[in-house]
């Protein structure tokens, strides 16, 4: 009597978790933007906190975009290998 061979599942390509990439990019971008704002010169008419929030929000926007592009590139490279 022969035993059936165990079925092997085809290996799926590893894809990045986009939500984690985007959230991490936004947080890092906000931190970098806020630090740049605090370390820079004071602007007349804005408090330090307001400047940190504005530049931090801009940094979060840019960081999210860069993280999204990185995630897409990693996704495409992982799919090309399979």
Image (tube, helix red, strand yellow):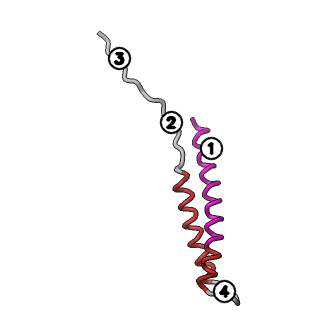
Q: Is residue 82 above or below residue 3?
A: below
- The residue identified by callout 4 is 46
Residue 81 figure quarter? top right
> Is 23 positioned to the left or the right of 62 in the image?
left
Q: Gap between marks 2 and 1, in whole Å?
A: 13 Å
- Given this view, does label 4 or label 1 mark the residue nearer the observer? 4
> In percent of the image, x 62 and y 71: which residue is there?
57
Q: Gap between marks 4 and 1, in whole Å?
A: 43 Å
Earlier-in-chain disc, 4 versus 2? 2
Earlier-in-chain disc, 1 versus 3? 3
Label 3 Cα crowd, 10 Å radius (few <14 / some 14-19 / many 20+)? few
Q: Position of residue 26 (x, y in %)?
A: 58, 64
Q: What is the residue that sits farthest to the top in this orientation?
A: 1
Label 2 Cα crowd, 10 Å radius (few <14 / some 14-19 / many 20+)? few
Q: Is residue 41 above or below residue 6?
A: below
- The residue identified by callout 2 is 12
Q: Check disc 2 and report its element: helix, strand or loop.
A: loop
- The residue identified by callout 1 is 76
């Amino acid at each position: 009597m022969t035993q059936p061979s165990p079925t092997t599942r085809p290996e799926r390509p590893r894809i990045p978790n986009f939500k984690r990439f985007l959230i991490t990019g936004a947080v890092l971008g906000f931190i970098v933007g806020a630090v740049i704002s605090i370390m820079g010169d004071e602007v007349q008419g804005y408090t330090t906190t307001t400047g940190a929030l504005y530049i931090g929000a801009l940094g979060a926007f840019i960081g999210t975009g860069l993280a999204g592009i990185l995630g897409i590139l990693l996704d495409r490279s992982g799919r090309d290998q399979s």
